[in-house]
Image (spheres, rainbow, N blue to C red):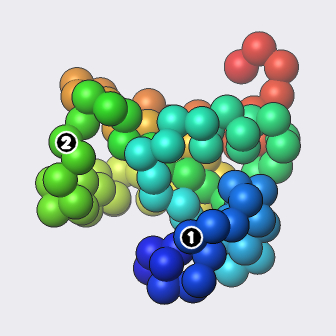
Amino acid sequence: MHVRDLGLQAAEDRDLFRRAAAEARTIVSADTDFGTLLALTRDSKPSVVIFRRSTSRRLATQIELLVKNLSTIEPALIRGAVVVFEDTRIRVRHLPIVGDE
C-alpha cells in the first residue's frame, strides 16, 4: 500500500510512523532519514525497510529483492527493526535503537 492510497502523501514522517505502528505495518522507503528519525524516537515499531541509493531505483527490482530476502528478514521486522538494503549486503538493526549499539 502506498501513502497516496491512504491520502498521506503530504503527511509528516512522525504521522506515518504512528499510523504504521498502530496498524502493525512496515514502512518501505528509499528515504535514508527514516532510520535516523526512528532511532531518535526510541520506539520499537514500526519496522522500516530502506533501499539505499546504491540499490536499484526500479520498483520491480526492489520488490524482487525484498521478496527474495523476506524469509530472512521477516523475524526481525516482526520484532521491530530497521533493515537496510545495500548493493552487497543487508543490514539489520533491532529496535529500539539506544545508546551506542
Residue 80 lies, with reference to residue 94, above or below; the image says: below
**Image quadrant of residue 12?**
bottom right
Q: Amino acid at mark 2?
A: Ser
Q: Quadrant of the C terminus?
A: top right
Taking 19 as reference, is 53 left or right? left
Which residue bears the numbered disc 1? 9
Q: Nearer the viewer, residue 80 or 28?
A: 28
Q: Quadrant of the N terminus?
A: bottom left
Q: Amino acid at mark 1?
A: Gln
Taking 98 as reference, is 33 left or right? left
Which residue bears the numbered disc 2? 56
**Image quadrant of residue 33?**
top right
Taking 73 as reference, is 61 left or right? left
Mark 1 → mark 2, Cα distance in angstroms: 22 Å
At horizontal 44% and vertical 31% (from top left) the residue drawn is 91
As helix, strand or loop, the secondary structure at mark 2 comes to loop
